């Protein structure tokens, strides 16, 4: 059976691009990207359009939109939600009503550096060992069970920009490995 993903985004969408490429190259055997949801117009939503993906920009300042979004997801027969650079907190009411998996990508070795600007904070703290995490979303921020992690190490003298690029590359690999694993062990 095909797993139908909705991907939630907010910004550049390099992680969305990563999985759109994976899908378009025929690498995903039992999964499809059906819908892209953004909280504002952003480069990520343009990427979704370029790949002719159903997409929707939602104004989350209105709390009633969560109920409408649930309807949209159900209509599209979505099985799982993937948060790839989604910068809004998912309402706990939505998590309860949705009741199906929500997976979040976070740029730290959780439980370290929960919340915003995790890469910048780890850089400023001169952390030796850093990394990226995939975890299940629960009501408490960045706190659900860990699904997969990968680490990277500080290179002395490296700029924040270069470190951020290394984070993105590692994220792309982590997400790719995670999805390919799901094809083998759903
Ligand atoms: C990624 O680094 C992702 O881990 C992070 O936002 C970036 C999005 O990049 N997510 C969070 O910080 C979530 N708390 P992208 O738009 O290029 O995929």
Image: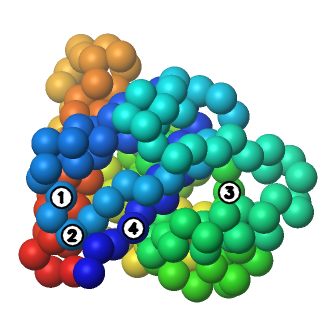
Question: Quick one: 130 or 134, which is closer to the camera?
Answer: 134
What residue do we see at 73% from left, 46% from top? 58
Instruction: Please determine whether, in this image, residue 8 is positioned above or below residue 167.
Output: below
User: Where in the image, quadrant-wise, is ligand 1 located?
Assistant: top left
**Res. 42 visible in picture:** yes
Q: CA distance from mark 3 to mark 2?
A: 29 Å
Question: Which sits earlier in the primary sequence, circle 4 or circle 2?
Answer: 4
Relative to 92, 138 lies left or right = left
Determine whether label 1 and label 2 are within 8 Å by CB.
Answer: yes
Determine whether label 1 and label 3 are within 8 Å by CB.
Answer: no
Residue under label 4, please give it.
Answer: 4
Question: Which sits earlier in the primary sequence, circle 4 or circle 3?
Answer: 4
Determine whether label 1 and label 4 are within 8 Å by CB.
Answer: no
**Neighbourhood count class around disc 2 (C-alpha, 10 Å): few under 14, some 14–19, many 20 upward:** some
Mark nearest the camera among 3 and 2 is 2
What residue do we see at 55% from left, 66% from top? 76
Q: Position of residue 51 (x, y in %)?
A: 38, 35
Residue under label 1, please give it.
Answer: 28
Q: CA distance from mark 4 to mark 3?
A: 22 Å
Instruction: Please determine whether, in this image, residue 34 is positioned above or below residue 85.
Output: below
What residue do we see at 18% from left, 58% from top? 28
**Neighbourhood count class around disc 3 (C-alpha, 10 Å): few under 14, some 14–19, many 20 upward:** few
Q: Is mark 1 within 8 Å of ligand 1?
A: no
Residue under label 3, please give it.
Answer: 89
The image quarter containing residue 152 is top left
């Amino acid at each position: 059976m095909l797993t139908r993903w909705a991907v939630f985004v907010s910004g550049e969408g390099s992680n969305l691009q990563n999985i759109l490429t994976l899908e378009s190259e025929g690498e995903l055997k039992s999964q499809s990207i059906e819908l892209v949801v953004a909280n504002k117009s952003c480069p990520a939503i343009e990427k979704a359009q370029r790949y002719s993906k159903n997409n929707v920009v939602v104004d989350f300042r209105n709390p009633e939109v969560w109920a409408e979004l649930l309807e949209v997801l159900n209509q599209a027969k979505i099985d799982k939600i993937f948060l790839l650079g989604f910068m809004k907190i998912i309402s706990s009411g939505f998590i309860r009503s949705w009741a199906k998996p929500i997976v979040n990508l976070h740029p730290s070795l959780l439980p370290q550096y929960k919340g915003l600007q995790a890469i910048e904070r780890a850089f400023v703290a001169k952390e030796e060992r850093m990394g990226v995490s995939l975890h299940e979303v629960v009501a408490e921020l960045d706190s659900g069970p860990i699904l997969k992690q990968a680490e990277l190490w500080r290179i002395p003298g490296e700029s924040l920009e270069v470190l951020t690029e290394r984070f993105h590359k590692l994220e792309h690999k982590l997400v790719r490995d995670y999805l390919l694993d799901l094809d083998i062990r759903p």
